[in-house]
Amino acid sequence: MARQHDRRSATAKVSLARALSKLGFCSRTQAEHLVVEGRVQVNGKTVRDALLRIDPDRDRIGVDGERIVAERKVYLMLNKPRGLVTTRDDPEGRGTVYDCLAGLDLPFVSPVGRLDKASEGLLLLSNDTRWANGLLDPASHVAKTYHVQIAAAADEAMLERFRQGAVVDGELLTASSIALLRSGGRTAWLEIVLDEGRNRQIRRLLGAFDIEVLRLIRVAIGQLQLGEVAKGQARHLTSEELAMLSA
């Protein structure tokens, strides 16, 4: 029994910086700075090693002498506007998705995945790292649906070429499905569904065919629809929506 207990304790341990993030106090990067500055205590003693392995459920963690306890779990959906980066602090001083959360009474939350600066639509944020990691795990195959405007008229022959995929920088890029929503003049709207999350996957895939992406909007994650959430606005997920994503 003692050995089993030791194994469970070892498994439960994470770095001090990650522990502060898991507790919803701050990001891991911010936690690393706090530790180096000597502002973090573990079981009453100041620690300056952000990689120190601790058990967040057993060890007492403090910042500036105040004990840190787990924040309430928060699950948000945001309609991300184009032009914002998906990070808390941007070294280039660009606007971030956190600007949309200003004035809301929230603990620290992190984006669940990414939308690049030029993309828009449904973005999830949470302080529940286990839940977020489950959604991001490639093995979960949670579908993500996008509406994509391209700078070209489209027909079935073009879509079939897209469906075959393309090798970009030695990486085969494909989509679960590609369908035409509407086409007219010099542009068209496509619905593209992905079940994996590679960096700029849609833009790179279409770029391999010399197709320019004019707009890229994520409209659904799994069965969760963006719906009527106004651009730049966020709201809490309902229990029913959480159940859909967790199924």
Image (spheres, helix red, strand yellow):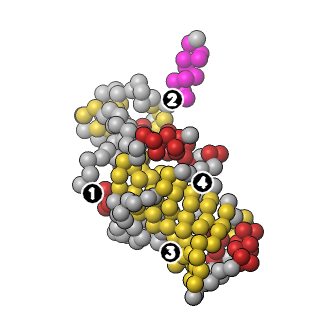
How far apart are labels 4 and 1 at the CA level?
Answer: 30 Å
Sequence order check: which comes first, mark 1 or mark 3? 1
Residue depicted at 66% across the width and 67% down the height: 178
Does the CB distance between marks 3 and 4 fall below 8 Å?
no
- The disc labelled 3 sits on which kind of residue? Arg
- The disc labelled 1 sits on which kind of residue? Ala
Question: Few, some or many C-alpha atoms within 10 Å of disc 2 (few <14, some 14-19, many ≥20)?
Answer: some
Q: Which residue is mark 3?
A: 215
**Image location (x, y in percent) of residue 19:** 42, 37
Q: Is residue 213 magenta?
A: no
How far apart are labels 1 and 3 at the CA level?
Answer: 26 Å
Residue depicted at 50% across the width and 61% down the height: 219
Sequence order check: which comes first, mark 3 or mark 4? 4
Q: Which residue is mark 4?
A: 143
- Indicate left or right for 7 with 74 as reference: right
- Indicate left or right for 63 with 12 as reference: left
Sequence order check: which comes first, mark 2 or mark 1? 2
Quarter of the image where the N terminus is located: top right
Question: Few, some or many C-alpha atoms within 10 Å of disc 4 (few <14, some 14-19, many ≥20)?
Answer: some
SS for callout 3 = strand
Q: Which residue is mark 1?
A: 102
Q: Which residue is mark 2?
A: 12
**Image location (x, y in percent) of residue 193:** 61, 61
- The disc labelled 4 sits on which kind of residue? Ala
Looking at the image, is 150 positioned above or below residue 10? below
- The disc labelled 2 sits on which kind of residue? Ala
**Image location (x, y in percent) of residue 213:** 56, 77
Q: What residue range appears in magenta? A: 2-12
